[in-house]
Structure formats: structure tokens, C-alpha cells
Image (tube, grey):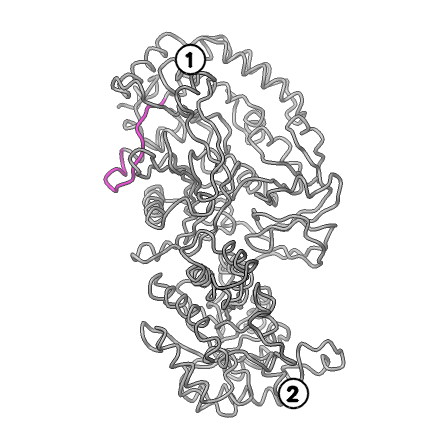
Amino acid sequence: MSSTHLATALVIPFEHLRMHDVEVVGGKNASLGEMISQLAATGVRVPGGFATTAHAFREFLTHGGLTEKINARLDALDTDDVNALAAAGAQIRQWVIDAPFPADFEAAVRASFAELTAGNPSASFAVRSSATAEDLPDASFAGQQETFLNVHGIDDVLHKMKEVFASLYNDRAISDRVHKGFAHADVALSAGVMFTIDTESGFEDVVFITASYGLGETVVQGAVNPDEFYVHKPGLKAGKQAIIRRNLGSKLIRMEFAPTDERLATGKLVRTVDNPPELRNRYALNDADVAELAKYALIIEQHYGRAMDIEWGKDGEDGKLYILQARPETVKSQSANQTEHRYKLKGQSAVLAEGRAIGQKIGTGPVRLVRDISQMDQVQPGDVLVTDMTDPNWEPVMKRASAIVTNRGGRTCHAAIIARELGIPAVVGTGDATERLKDGTLVTVSCAEGDTGHIYDGLLETEVTEVQRGAMPPIATKIMMNVGNPQLAFDFAQLPNEGVGLARLEFIINNNIGVHPKAILDYPQVDGDLKKAVESVARGHASPRAFYVDKVAEGVATIAAAFWPKPVIVRLSDFKSNEYRKLIGGSRYEPEEENPMLGFRGAARYISDDFREAFAMECEALRRVRDDMGLTNVQIMVPFVRTLAQAERVVALLADKGLRRGVNDLKVVMMCEVPSNAILAERFLEHFDGFSIGSNDLTQLTLGLDRDSGLELLAADFDERDPAVEALIHQAIQACRAQGKYIGICGQGPSDHPDFARWLADEGIVSISLNPDSVIDTWTLLSQ
């Protein structure tokens, strides 16, 4: 279709549209046309349809005499006055509803409708907005205009078109166009949203997918807490099992098309119903569907050449996945080159509520509880806005808030999208924040601690540091990172680094599992309360054992994917018996030791008959990450190996469980943290590919100090720079260098003492692994 004809057309079929037609039909329509015409051969499925044009809309306004009336009404409006904004919007919307369509426009819509339905009276339509200012690369306008689903018959389609046109003048749309500088002039089994970028950190190597049952409006609006999936792009391209993380959402409700009799009786096109427990407790998508969606996402991202925000649906009739919308991601991809700040809490207090963290900032202020949109004008600058959920009409006051907290919603809901756009921290999907938080209470809203956001009692001290991204000066020593929380890995990976020198399993087991591994293995032969606890955490998984392996694998895979292809050295679980006792069911399985620091831990635990089967689950998870997911940058580190006999037995046990040194380039290193390790370094190295010095334990065992002791007298003597400790470290470094094997350090010392870091570099250590907040300063110091 020629550009001249397009400019004056009133209605255009999707297949005649391309991306360069945004000014004619708006972003959504142009994108759907682009995908139908350009991506059909790749297998990406897009439903058919037609678009009405911006020219048709302008003709409609002129025909009804509305253009001058609306402009005059808006020019006199103060958009910061929410009551005046609401009154003006309501008046303009009614003008639009009451205005007639031009005859030629209505005739064109009727003809296109007849062609598309081909005489099928039961055909169901979605009538959606595609305003020409929407979804441009630097403006999201999330959910700004109305969408109507399950529309039957041409008369209903025409009526809903009027309502969509009217929604161009809802309160948020008017406010948005002023502030951003724009002129005023399907049956679904499951649905959701996906991004070709991590929405919180901007990490580009994952596809982030949300999913829930029924129509996708509940996910977009934030009325439901959806399932979440992260897919590693390089793994997907290599044909590996690339789903690196799953989060099971509550999915309490679903939106579905209203049955014909209900629709005719009430006029309602859709209805919301509760999901039964058996649906809530399993994932809305299987792995094959997640992989197919992620492949579509990669194709779409490659075609458009930028990060994309994509809506999808699974058809309830043919069971196939369809792309319903694709538009540029509008927040993280725009801020990639901007200076960022890292927030850190310096204090602690009671947690009043928690949910899904949006952004990585911290906000403080008094709680402003808003139960109904009519109370919006009560929100003052600096308030913490607390409500059930938000929609586009809330936007005029959201920008006033220091933080936003909602009962419902996931990472792709309206509140989340707008909070990111405004740079405001938000905690969504808390479940009951409107009941737990009292109006006027001073709180701290923290999104700086990973996926989970916390609302703390009181105003806590916050530290803000500027994040430096980009090239660092060259140095001989590799600067690696200590990472425990997988939820922060995507962000940490964007700091300068040479990989991960210590990935801790303890955080994953504590936070993502929470149950003692032997309770998992003994299920269902455990007592009633423990049995219920195991069943609760294992929801959505094939069995409790599968749950344990899945969660360990996902935690490790998330860290490994974040730093891919740089090495990630994973230390096998190093809980002591007192720490294992704190897990659910732990007191049933763990001894009460007088000094657990020197007790049943490390290699001795793995090879014992008492723990061998629990350790097998850990090995299975690591084998899956390397072999099935293709994350061969994962290396294994064995902690607390007291004797040569333990070294031999633990390496043999790993090999027996599918983790054999040298196979698929697997390296197995040992924590050098017991004095015997340094004294007999050459002989221990016969069993391992190198050492990583654990300076914390090496110091306490060399100096005979209990590092868990609360006595200040002892604490003053704890120093990794003591000559005896340095002598053992020197011995270990020289032994590894003589054999050409890896030697690094992952203890706290170099993070706390820059002079110790310099001494290690001078000794010829290969790598120093630091806490993330010490990386840039230590790197800079060593370059001088």
C-alpha cells in the first residue's frame, strides 16, 4: 500500500503495515503489522486484525466539532490539581462518547470487520488503543488507554471504539502528555508479559517472562501475582535447558471471557473468577512453552535491534502461543549509559511487610494509606503511597510519593512499570500491606536487598554510593567477587570483575529452600507439622527432592549466567551443625556441638554415611547446571578438608556423582583454610586443580581464636596480617605457582585491609575475590 494512500486511509489491515507506519496507526498496530509481514517465516505467531488510523481519529474529532472544544478545555487546566484534572477528563470523555462517527469511517470499519470474520457470527474481538505517542522508545504510557476483550458483533465493536477514543483523555493520559511534551492534538489459557532484558538491573543476557492463567489483563494491571521465569539467552541459542530461575506466583484470580448468556444479560464482556488451589500451586507454563516464548523474544529483539517489552497469550482453542504486542522497553534500556547509584541500609528494625522489589533504591516517609482513588488528593510529596493496586488513573499522584507499596501485582504490573519510569522504589504483591501498615507511620521501603522488598519500621540510615561502570586500569592480579545472593547477581555482574571467586550455597539453601535436606529426603515419613512445611515449600515441583535440586540449580545457574562466560567458583555447602539446626526440621537431624566451628562440617560431612544422600542432591544440581544448562564456567570448591584421606575420598565421591575433574573442563579447587592444607600443600594439590585461601578460618585456626566469640579481648587479636598467617599463605601461594595451578583468596581480609590486598598481589596470587562494595576501590589501589 503506497505511503500516500496510507496517510489518508481510515482502516488498514495489519498485514499491510510496517514499523515505519507508527505515525499513521500508532506503535502497537505498526509493531503487529511488522511482525505479521516480517516474522511469520520464523514461526512467530501473531493474531490477525485491522487498524484504524490517526487520520480517521482526527476526522472523527473534526466531524463532531470536538477539536477546538477539547483544546480550549485542556489549555486552561492545571494538571497538578487532581480534582480539576478528574472533572476535565470526565467531561471530555463524555463529549467523545456522544459524538457520531463520520459515515465513510463507519462504513470502512464495517467492511473490514466483515472481511475478517468471514461470516462467523461467534468471532470474538479485542478492541485496543494504539495512540501514536504510545510506546515510543523513551515513553511507556503503560496501560494508558482502554482495552476491551471478548467484543462480539460490529455494533459492539463500534461502541467500544468510541470508549477507546474517549480513554485518550483519562486523567493519567492528559497528565502524561503534558509532562512528556506530547501535544493533546482472544480466549486464553494463560497469558503474560516478557522482556528481553532484566527489568531491575538492565542485565541484557536474559529473557524475563511472567505468566498467569486466563487473559493477560490481570498481569498487566497488577491484579494478580504471576509466575516468573528467567531464560539465559546464550544457553537458549546453544540449544541447552536455559531456564535458570523460576518463581511461583500466587495467581489467586484469573480473567476469562464471560459466557454468552452472562454477557447478554449483564453486558459484561469478561469476568474474574478465583483459581482453585491445584492451579495456584503449579506453574501456568511448562518448560517447553517458556522456551518457545523465549525463542520468539530473541527473534523479535533481533529484528528490532533493541530491548523489547512483549505481551503474549496461549490460545485456549488451538493451544498455541501468540504474540499480542511488542514495543520497545522504555526504562532500563534508556538508562544504560547513565550514572547509577547503589543504595545500602545501615540500620535494622522490625519488618512490617514484604513483597516483590521494584528497582534497587530505598525510600522513606510517612505511610499514606489510600483505599480508594477518590482519596488521591490526600497524598503529599514524600509520602509512602500504600494501596491495593494502581491503574493509569493513579499516575498524577504516584510521582509525589517517595515509595509505593501495593497488595497485588508482579514485576510487570502497572505500579511496577510506572515506579521504574519515575525512579521511585516500589514493593508490590505484599498481600496485606494495607492491613499491616498504619496511616502516618514512619517507614523505610527498601528494594536494595534482592528480589524481596521490605518495609521496615522507622526511618533507617541509608548509604548511597555512585556506581562506576566501564573500563578499569589493567593490573596483574584478577579481581573477582564474592556473591551469595543470586537475586543481586545480575546487578553485581555489571561492576568491573574477572568472575566470581566465591559463590556461596548457604544463602540459596537458607532463603530459597529453608528446610533441612534430610527432612526433604525423609518425606513423607516425617511428623505432621514437618510434612506440611515440606509440602508448602515444594509446591509446583514434581517432588520435595526435585524441589531441592531445582532450587540449588537455579540459584547457582543465576550467578553463573550473570557472569557468563567468566569463571564462577561455587563453594559446596559449608553450614556448621548449629546453622543446619536453624533450618526447618534441623533440630531433628543435627547434633548439639560445643564448638561447631571445629565440628561436623565440610568434606567430613559430605563423605559421612549420615549425610551422603543429602550431598548427592547438591551434586545433582551442580551437574545439571554444567551439563544440561551448559554453564560450564561453574567450577567447584571443597571447603574444610582436614586430611589427605578426606581429600582423596571427597574427590572420588564427586566423580561418582558425575562431577569428575577434567571432564567437560571441570576444575575442582580446595579451600586452603586449615593449617594442614598449607603445610602439606604439595600433597593436597595432587587431588585438586588449585587453592582458594579462606583467610577467615585459616586465621582462627592458626592463632587458636574462635572467630564467633563475642569477647572483644579475642577479637582484637584476630588479624589476617599476623606473621604466622602470612607465612602459611606464602607457603600455599608458592606451592601452587610451582605446580602451575590456580591460587586465589576469597576471605574477608582483602576487603577490609587494602594493605593486605597489596601484599597478596606482591606475593603473586592469581586472584583476589572481594565483596562487591570493595571491588572498585581495591582495583584502583592495586593499579597505583
Would you identify the image quadrant in which residue 346 lies? bottom right
Question: Which residue is labeled 1 in the image?
Answer: 59
Relative height, residue 777 to residue 291 (above, below)? below
Quarter of the image with the N terminus is top left
Quarter of the image with the C terminus is bottom right
Residue 364 in the image, given as x and y percentages of width and height: 70, 47
From this viewpoint, is residue 57 visible? yes
Give the extent of the magenta segment: 37-51
Viewer-closest of 65 and 2:
65
Which residue in the rendered view is the most extreme toward the left? 41
User: Residue at the location (42% across, 13% down)?
Assistant: 59
User: Residue at the location (62% across, 75% down)?
Assistant: 754
Tag 1: amino acid? Glu
Would you identify the image quadrant in which residue 404 lies? top right
Residue 15 in the image, given as x and y percentages of width and height: 28, 28
Viewer-closest of 297 and 522:
522
Tag 2: amino acid? Leu
Residue 741 in the image, given as x and y percentages of width and height: 41, 83
**Image-based side of 771 in relation to 524, left or right:** right
